[in-house]
Image (spheres, rainbow, N blue to C red):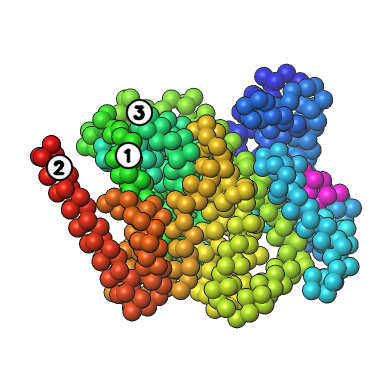
Amino acid sequence: MDRKIIIRIVGVTCLALATFHLYAAGVKIFPPLQQRSMHYGLALVIIFLTYPLITKKDGDNMERQEEGRIPIIISFLLALLSIWVTGYVFLNHISLLTAISNPSTMTIVIGAIMIILTLEATRRTLGWALPIISGIFIIYALLGNKLPLLFAHTGYSFADVVSKVGMSNVGIFGQPLGVSATYIILYVIFGSLLAASGAGKLFIDLSMAAVGRYRGGAAKVSIVSSALSGTISGNPVSNVVTTGVLTIPLMKKQGYKSEYAGAVETISSTGGIILPPIMGAVAFLIADFLQVEYAEVAFAAIIPAILYFVAVFIMVDLNAARLETSSGLKREENVYNVKELLLTKGHLLIPIFVLVYFLLVERNTPIYSAFWAIISIPLVCLIRKETRMSIRKIVESLQEGVKLSLMVVSACACAGIVIGVIDMTGIGLRFAGILTDLAGGSLFLLLVLTMVSSIILGMGLPPVAAYLVLAIVVGPALIEFGVTPMAAHMFIFYYGCLSVITPPVAVAAFAASSLAKSNPNKTALIALRLGLTAFIVPFLFVYGPELLMDGSTMEIALACVSALVGVFALSVALEGYLISEINIYTRVIMFLAALLLMSVGMLTDIIGALIVTLITAIEFKKHGEIRKVGIKTTKVS
């Protein structure tokens, strides 16, 4: 088949899927199974016609499509098969709700095909990791009754497994795909349209105007712009690729090494996912899981996100101070004017305020809020002639938004397989019990085990899919131990996100290294050091829920001050620089002071604050004496 025809089919299908979701969000509500089947069917068609059956690596370590008549024919047949099976679900969505308990031959056949299509679609979009994990769970559902008692279940037939996992609303068509078909695709489309309107470039320009002229300005521009873009894009990797194209060359031009430039972009883009208001749509999932209002989740996430970015900002600033004195780091001179930018392009930010208004003031659903935010973008662009969007540009942006969501769609469907098996066999509660038993009554040890489990299970997954799996498998262990539900879900969400910067599968760091032309492992390790505070913050809000806005105003204020001073001390200890280079002994003392400040307790906070104050005063005095000596020496000479 001619490749041009396939491209046209993909374009029309993308537009149809975007239109369907806008219609479902703002005009007519569809039954869950019907909406999910339409969403997934069209997405599968696009995946099979866009992502190749076989890929090969070229000399630049970049994937290239393996063209050929047979692979294209196979992909086209899989697309047709996807229309048939999802169309069957769409037309029979009511009868299927009861037919799963006593499945017909047709239900079993379509369920099996659906599982195969899901595994193949996920392999094409995300690689082998998640399909292998899902395959192991399916084997466990079929053969788990033969395992030792600790892991065994009562046993299920092939018909039970394929019908419940492949066709029911607790399997592939379960909550993860439901989230993809409601929240996620709308917010990805919103981000795509917003970027096409020029708001993405405006984020970078405003960041340049705000911090570009200061030391380490290019790195700080990366932090601010990636934070703003990341909260909307919802995916650290796509955020790295989008903003990193501009910020990484800017950092290298200013004098930063390639590995450091890639690491700053990696850690900044990752942090965007934990930054309110949108948090990559995960905020809505947490609210859904905990049955609380979205605003409660957004407010709970504010302080941890601030601590994250303050730590990165301080470390980048200290590193820039060192480079300015040692290697002559350049300062950016061509910076923008904030007032001028807001006067000429500030209207492009209105859709974000529309979204926040509908979410927090009107208290509308996230779906309805996203609908009006999307509609507002082309309307707002009409305000100025130079920002107006043509019909073609709007259509292309809608198509691009759908394409950007494909990885999440396949990941959510594949995660549905895992969650479906967990629901059938009860292994999730058993896993929670295993973690609790291994912890031996120690909350700290349980948190460490949960952290490791979350990072491992989240590797290679988009944040949404990672959170969904972790919320089912790992989250119950923390709640059972007595951790507040909000703290427990925020804990696993953080570490699920941080898996993208954690070697050996640091996908965000690897994406940044390809742009920076740097060593990917070195880039990942530097990003890990810059983000070390992020690995500590979740422990802080579990032990001190005041950091999640849970407490009186005074308690929250004291916890914030203590944590901020602790973050400063930790940053100084990790960078080894304050006013000038500090020795290893001072770094160790500052690190211990940081731990004291970050622990819960008034006494430890006071001791830690005194240590930080004393060391800072000594370093300032020492630096002042060095400067005096330098001045006298200059006069004598």
Q: Which residue is mark 3?
A: 387
Query: Magenta part of the protein: which range?
Result: 109-117
Q: Which residue is mark 2?
A: 633
Residue 485 is situated, as x and y percent measured from the top left of the image, at 52, 71
Q: Tag 2: Cα neighbours inside 10 Å, few (<14), some, or many (≥20)?
A: few
Which is in the foreground here, disc 3 or disc 2? Answer: 2
Calculate the distance from the C-alpha at mark 3 to the C-alpha at mark 2. Answer: 59 Å
Taking the spot 74% from the left edge, 48% from the top edge, the residue there is 131
Q: Which element is circle 2 on?
A: helix
Q: Quadrant of residue 603?
A: bottom left
In front of the other: 251 or 113 = 251
Residue 411 can be seen in this image: yes
Q: Which element is circle 1 on?
A: helix
Which is in the foreground here, disc 2 or disc 1? Answer: 2
In the image: residue 427, left or right of residue 358: right
Calculate the distance from the C-alpha at mark 1 to the C-alpha at mark 3. Answer: 44 Å
Taking the spot 50% from the left edge, 63% from the top edge, the residue there is 490
Q: In the picture, which quadrant includes the C terminus?
A: top left
Q: Establish if 616 lies above or below 154.
A: above
Residue 95 is situated, as x and y percent measured from the top left of the image, at 77, 57
Residue type highlighted by circle 1:
Ser
Taking the spot 30% from the left edge, 44% from the top edge, the residue there is 321
In front of the other: 536 or 519 = 519
Calculate the distance from the C-alpha at mark 2 to the C-alpha at mark 1. Answer: 20 Å
In the image: residue 302, left or right of residue 71: left
Sequence-earlier tag: 1 or 3? 1
Residue type highlighted by circle 2:
Thr
Q: Which residue is mark 1?
A: 326
**Count of marks placed on residues:** 3
Q: Quadrant of residue 168?
A: bottom right
As drawn, the residue found furthest toward the left would be 635
